Image (spheres, rainbow, N blue to C red):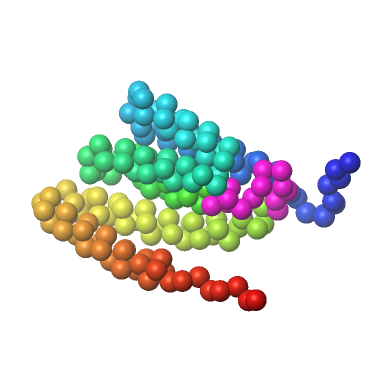
Amino acid sequence: MNRVPVLGVLTIPGWSVRALFAAIALPFVLVGIPVGTWTGIAAVLIGVAVWRPRWFTAWVLIGILLLSSLVEPGTVTPRLLGLVAGVHALHLVAGWMLVVPSAARVQPAVLLPSLRRFVLIQVPAQAAAVVLLLSARGASSPLLALLSGLALVALVGLLLPALLRRPPRAPR
């Protein structure tokens, strides 16, 4: 007989994290991906990501959503700004799906630090996206390509040391 311990604190079922992922992903798939085969593929990816988070299909879906944004002109639109926040939210919730079993009970308070970081990152990211897209109207494409390339090189330079670092050995 399974009994839920009374902790005196509000808990939510672990499957609600997976439902949240689907609730965030589905509108972006319906709005952001061209109708046709890709919509079906993205819907299957949502289902697989919710069913088996350890297969990392959530990040394949995120990649498809990001690639779909390339068909849009470089202007400030609510869809593009929503995509910036939505992809970040999908990444956050996909990470939660990796550590929260669907049969578990979760105290929402443990998710607050991640939500706080989400807001702290999204406020400047949204402002930077608006400024860059508005300032890019008169700029030439080669200049923007050069700036994008430099930003990508800087990002790789920041992430590469952490990715190449060996994990610490477990004590024997």
| Nearer to me, 130 or 155 | 155
Coordinates of residue 65 in the picture (x, y in percent) = 37, 40
* Span colored in magenta: 95-107
Q: Is residue 98 magenta?
A: yes
Q: How many marks?
A: 0
**Rendering quarter of residue 125:** bottom left
| Residue most extreme to the top | 36
Q: Tell me which residue sits at (42%, 26%) in the image.
A: 40
Q: Tell me which residue sits at (50%, 70%) in the image.
A: 167
Q: Tell me which residue sits at (85%, 43%) in the image.
A: 2
Rendered position, 156 above or below 132 = below
Q: Is residue 83 left or right of residue 43?
A: left
Q: Is residue 65 magenta?
A: no
| Nearer to me, 135 or 54 | 54
**Quarter holding the C terminus?**
bottom right
Coordinates of residue 122 in the picture (x, y in percent) = 43, 55
Q: Is residue 58 left or right of residue 79?
A: right
Coordinates of residue 87 in the picture (x, y in percent) = 42, 46
Q: Is residue 52 left or right of residue 66?
A: right
**Quarter holding the N terminus?**
top right
Rendered position, 28 above or below 35 = below
Q: Is residue 146 left or right of residue 166?
A: left
**Rendering quarter of residue 80:** top left
Rendered position, 98 above or below 167 = above
Work out whether residue 83 can be spotted.
no
Rendered position, 38 above or below 53 = above
Q: Tell me which residue sits at (58%, 37%) in the image.
A: 51
| Residue most extreme to the bottom | 171
| Residue most extreme to the front | 172
Work out whether residue 142 can be spotted.
yes
